[in-house]
Image (tube, coloured by chain):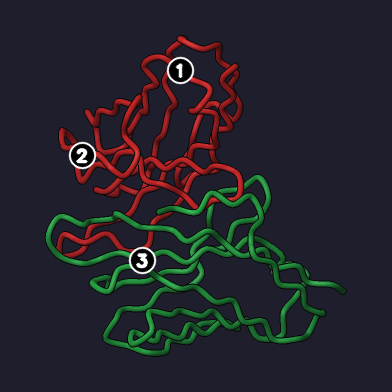
């Protein structure tokens, strides 16, 4: 069933450190994964995505790792900055058929970066 | 481009009232969707559309109606508001590639309170 917790996982880091945010996904048929960043009072903002035929993808200061064996996804942020403070969501989708954009979102992780 | 716009930003309704949340995008995206976000939770899909005249239900469609008469607009109607519909509502859009929606662009959200 769905967890209804009001307490999101949190990660606190110092400015300049590397951050790793983890996500366990639920559907072994999912083949598209995406990370979003959500700042307070704003809509989610795309960070990076990855297809299931890859196990790693790099962007600017961010890397996503995918482990399909254990259904685990991680987001690595290099040289974390105060502006990275936000809630980070992973989402999964299954390509093909009529799945279209039916993203299933995780609960989210609060990242706090201390100067 | 204005991207995805939503109105109103805030709304308070009494139980039983109806209203329409507006969503518009100027990117000529085929795919549009509505999500709700409750405290401490990820986004849950309410309804989606893959083009004008085509809509379908998401994970939590009860109590909501949608229509898609144009590519640009995708309004969400609350038929008879209930306190359980107190939430933040996000509209998103994306192009379809090979029938699949990848990165979705989110609007700023509408914060709805039902008393």
What distance separates the C-alpha of mark 3 from that of mark 2?
A: 19 Å
Residue A6: image location, x then y, percent:
63, 49
Residue located farthest toward the left when viewing the structure as drawn: A97
Along the viewing direction, whichever of A59 and A4 lies nearer the viewer:
A4
Chain hosting mark 2:
B
- Chain A drawn colour: green
What distance separates the C-alpha of mark 1 from that of mark 2?
A: 21 Å
Chain hosting mark 3:
A
Mark 3 nearby-residue class (10 Å; few <14, some 14–19, many ≥20): many
SS for callout 3: strand
Q: Counting residues from the N terminus, which is met first, the one under dot 1 or under dot 2? A: 2
Q: Which mark is residue A92?
A: 3
Q: How many marks?
A: 3
Residue B24: image location, x then y, percent:
39, 36
Chain hosting mark 1:
B
Decide if residue B69 is on the left or right side of residue A58. Answer: left
What distance separates the C-alpha of mark 1 from that of mark 3?
A: 30 Å
Q: Which mark is residue A49?
A: none
Labels 3 & 2 near each other (Cβ < 8 A): no
SS for callout 1: loop
- Chain B drawn colour: red
| Residue hosting label 2 | B56
Mark 2 nearby-residue class (10 Å; few <14, some 14–19, many ≥20): some
| Residue hosting label 1 | B81
Along the viewing direction, whichever of A44 and A4 lies nearer the viewer:
A4
Residue at horizontal 27%, vertical 74%? A28
């Amino acid at each position: 069933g769905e967890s209804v917790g009001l307490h999101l996982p949190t990660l606190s880091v110092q400015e300049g450190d590397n951050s790793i945010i983890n996500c366990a996904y639920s559907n072994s048929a999912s083949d598209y994964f995406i990370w979003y960043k959500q700042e307070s009072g704003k809509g989610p903002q795309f960070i990076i995505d990855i297809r299931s035929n890859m196990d790693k993808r790099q962007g600017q200061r961010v890397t996503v790792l995918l482990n399909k064996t254990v259904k685990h996804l991680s987001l690595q942020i290099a040289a974390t900055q105060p502006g990275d403070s936000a809630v980070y969501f992973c989402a999964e989708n299954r390509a093909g058929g009529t799945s279209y954009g039916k993203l299933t979102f995780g609960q989210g992780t609060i990242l706090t970066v201390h100067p | 481009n204005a991207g995805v716009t939503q109105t109103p930003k805030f709304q308070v309704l009494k139980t039983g009232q109806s209203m329409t949340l507006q969503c518009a995008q100027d990117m000529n995206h085929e795919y549009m969707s509505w999500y709700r976000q409750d405290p401490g939770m990820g986004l849950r899909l309410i309804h989606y559309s893959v083009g004008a005249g085509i809509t379908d239900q998401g994970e939590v469609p009860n109590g909501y109606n949608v229509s898609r008469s144009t590519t640009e607009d995708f309004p969400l109607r609350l038929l008879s508001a209930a306190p359980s519909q107190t939430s933040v509502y996000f509209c998103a859009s994306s192009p379809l590639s090979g029938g699949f929606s990848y990165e979705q662009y989110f609007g700023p959200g509408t914060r709805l309170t039902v008393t």
